[in-house]
Image: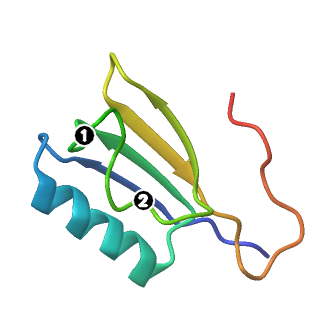
């Protein structure tokens, strides 16, 4: 059985909170994260690792990311 770990956090536009949350996502191997009010500079969120799939809205300031499970060949391909 595949287990998806999901995280959610409002980062209140804090650079430190955004970078710390990204680190937590990597360390705890989350599959999906829903983030409100991340820190944004030059129209992107700094610190996002290469390979993460991002779905975000500039005007709503929401980031959703999906990382393929390391132990699965079957995974969600579309969010909707």
Q: Which quadrant of the view contains residue 16?
A: bottom left
Q: Residue at x 32, y 74 (%)?
A: 24
Q: Which quadrant of the view contains residue 75?
A: bottom right
Q: Residue at x 70, y 65 (%)?
A: 68
Residue at the disc numbered 2: 48
| Residue 24 left/right relative to 80 | left
Considering the image in quadrants, where does the N terminus appear? bottom right
Q: Which mark is residue 50?
A: none
The location of residue 67, given as percent across then percent down, is 62, 62
As drawn, 34 above or below 29: above
Residue at the disc numbered 1: 40
Residue nearest the viewer, comparing 78 with 5: 78
Of the two numbered discs 2 and 1 on the same chain, state the one appearing first in sequence: 1
Q: Residue at x 18, y 47 (%)?
A: 11
The location of residue 60, given as percent across then percent down, is 33, 20
As drawn, 65 above or below 7: above
| Residue 31 left/right relative to 49 | right
Query: Label 1: how many residues lie within 10 Å, few (<14), some (14-19) or many (20+)?
Result: some
The location of residue 34, given as percent across then percent down, is 41, 45
The location of residue 17, given as percent across then percent down, is 15, 59
Considering the image in quadrants, where does the C terminus appear? top right
| Residue 46 left/right relative to 39 | right
| Residue 23 left/right relative to 80 | left
Q: Residue at x 82, y 75 (%)?
A: 72
């Amino acid at each position: 059985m595949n287990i998806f770990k999901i995280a959610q956090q409002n980062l209140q536009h804090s650079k430190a909170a955004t970078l710390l949350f990204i680190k937590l996502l990597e360390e705890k191997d989350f599959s999906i994260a829903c983030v409100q009010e991340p820190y944004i500079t030059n129209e992107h969120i700094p610190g996002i690792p290469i390979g993460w799939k991002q779905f975000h809205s500039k005007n709503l300031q929401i980031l959703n990311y999906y990382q393929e499970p390391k132990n699965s060949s079957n995974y969600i391909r579309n969010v909707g």
